[in-house]
Image: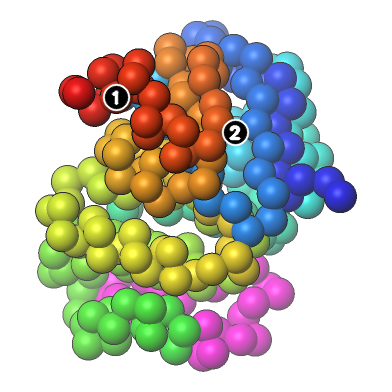
Amino acid sequence: MAALLDVSHIDLYRSETQVLWDISLTLEQGERVAILGSNGAGKSSFLAAVTATIAPRRGEIRFNGQSLAGMRPHAATGLGIALVPEGRRVYKDMSVRENLEMGAFPKSVRGRLKETLEHVIQLFPILGQRRDQPAGTLSGGEQQMLAIGRALMSRPKLLLVDELSLGLAPMITKSIYRTLSALGSDITILLVEQNVEQALNFSQRAYILESGRMTRSGRSADLLQDADIRRAYLGM
């Protein structure tokens, strides 16, 4: 059985600057996988490749058996790939409900908008309480919940989360991780995160990205106990 996401030996450039070298990664249906690394390691660039925002110069990305070569981002969304971007990027002048409805972009999910909206509000009840408020009036944690909810409105097979914990209080971060865990195996999650300990506790497998190159991979539980990882990323 083919992997849900199969990234094979990609090189990625931003303008003429190479940012990723020979990156390979696979995700099976229902997995939770983390990509870890310091700021500037190339994590967000990798997600840009998976969402078809930037095309690799070399290598191939296949999703559910289909190549993303030549595909536009909206088509990747239609296939079942959704991104929670770094910094949330909610539409601040629009209401919470309008932000969520914007996430139901693919034609295949518009007929189930009401059902999906109710599901998202069950996951994040505060969004139901705030549904008529402008998104810009929400706290940082509430905006992160909104960004995740907006991505879930497209009923994705693969959810990409870029820097979930950035700028959030630890208690809010843990609450959001618990909600993502409750999604179960219906949605595959690829998480990019600087909070290494939190990401390893959440994920089943992880890849280490350093200066645009994958340097380590393995079971998250094993990496969490690895002396080099603990020293380099956890300050232990």
Determine whether, in the image, residue 40 is placed left or right of residue 219: left
Label placed on residue 230 = 1
Q: Give how far across and how far down residue 221 sits, in percent.
A: 44, 40
Disc 2 residue type (three-letter): Ala
Determine whether, in the image, residue 196 is placed left or right of residue 9: left
Magenta residue span = 93-116
Instruction: Tell me, yes or no, if residue 102 can be seen here.
Output: no
Determine whether, in the image, residue 139 is placed left or right of residue 102: left
Most foreground residue, 67 or 214:
214
| Nearer mark to the viewer, of 1 and 2 | 1
Q: Which residue is mark 2?
A: 49
Quadrant in which the C terminus appears: top left
Q: Give how far across and how far down residue 67 sits, in percent.
A: 81, 40
Q: Which residue lies most toward the right here?
A: 1
Disc 1 residue type (three-letter): Arg
138 shown above or below 169 = below
